Amino acid sequence: MTMQEFHTRRRMWAATNHGVLIAAEGDPRTHIEWLSGHFGSEAALKFFPQTTRGYVLDGRLVAYRPSNGDDFSRWVDKAEVLKALDEFAKLGVEIHTVGLGVRASGTEQPWPTVAEASADKFRLSESRHKDGK
C-alpha cells in the first residue's frame, strides 16, 4: 500500500497527560499535523518527541516512540498502550494484535513492527507485570 493509502486507512492515536487522543477515521494527516490542530504547532513540536503514539489498521494497534535513526522505538509506556486499547474498545473498534516499534523499510506501508502479540496476550502480560507476577 502506498504512503497516501496508508495514511488515509490507518487511524492515528497519541497518548497525552489527559488520556488518549484518537483521530477521526480517514484523517490523512501526519501525527504532527494532527497534533498541531489540537495543541498548536509549537506545543505539538515540543510534545511530539516524547509521546507514545501509533495507529490502528485492520485490527492491529501499533505503538511506538521516536528514536534515533529511521526506526521508531518499541520502548513505549505499556500503560498508555492499554489506555489506547480501552479507548478503541469504547468506540467499538476490534483489535486483535498489538505491535510495538516500527522498522522503516522504504515507501511500502505499513512498515513491519519490532514485536507483536495478540491483544489478549498483551493485556494478560501487562496485568501480570503490574501485579508483580
Image: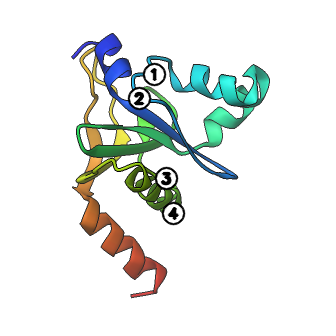
The answer to whether residue 84 is left or right of residue 57 is right
In front of the other: label 3 or label 4? Answer: 4
Label tally: 4
What is the quadrant of the N terminus in the image?
top left
Does label 2 or label 4 sit earlier along the sequence? 2
Q: Residues within 10 Å of mark 1 (few under 14, many from 20)?
A: some
Mark before the other along the chain sequence, 4 or 1: 1
Nearer to me, 95 or 72: 95
According to the picture, the residue beneath numbered tag 2 turns out to be: 25
Q: Secondary structure at mark 2?
A: loop
x, y percent for residue 10: 35, 29
Circles 1, 2 touching at the beta carbon (< 8 Å): yes
Q: CA distance from mark 2 to mark 4?
A: 24 Å
- The reply to whether dot 3 and dot 2 touch (C-beta < 8 Å) is no
Q: Position of residue 39 (x, y in %)?
A: 74, 30
Q: Earlier in the sequence, mark 3 or mark 1?
A: 1
CA–CA distance in space, label 1 to label 2: 6 Å
Q: Which mark is residue 79?
A: 4
**In percent of the image, x 49 and y 39: which residue is there?**
13
Q: Which residue is mark 3?
A: 76
Q: CA distance from mark 3 to mark 2?
A: 24 Å
> Does 10 appear above or below 87?
above
Q: Residues within 10 Å of mark 2 (few under 14, many from 20)?
A: few
**Amino acid type, callout 3:** Val
Identify the secondary structure beneath mark 4: helix
List the residue tagged with mark 1: 27
**130 to 81, vertically: above or below:** below
* Image depth: mark 3 or mark 1 in front: 1
Image quadrant where one finds the C terminus: bottom left
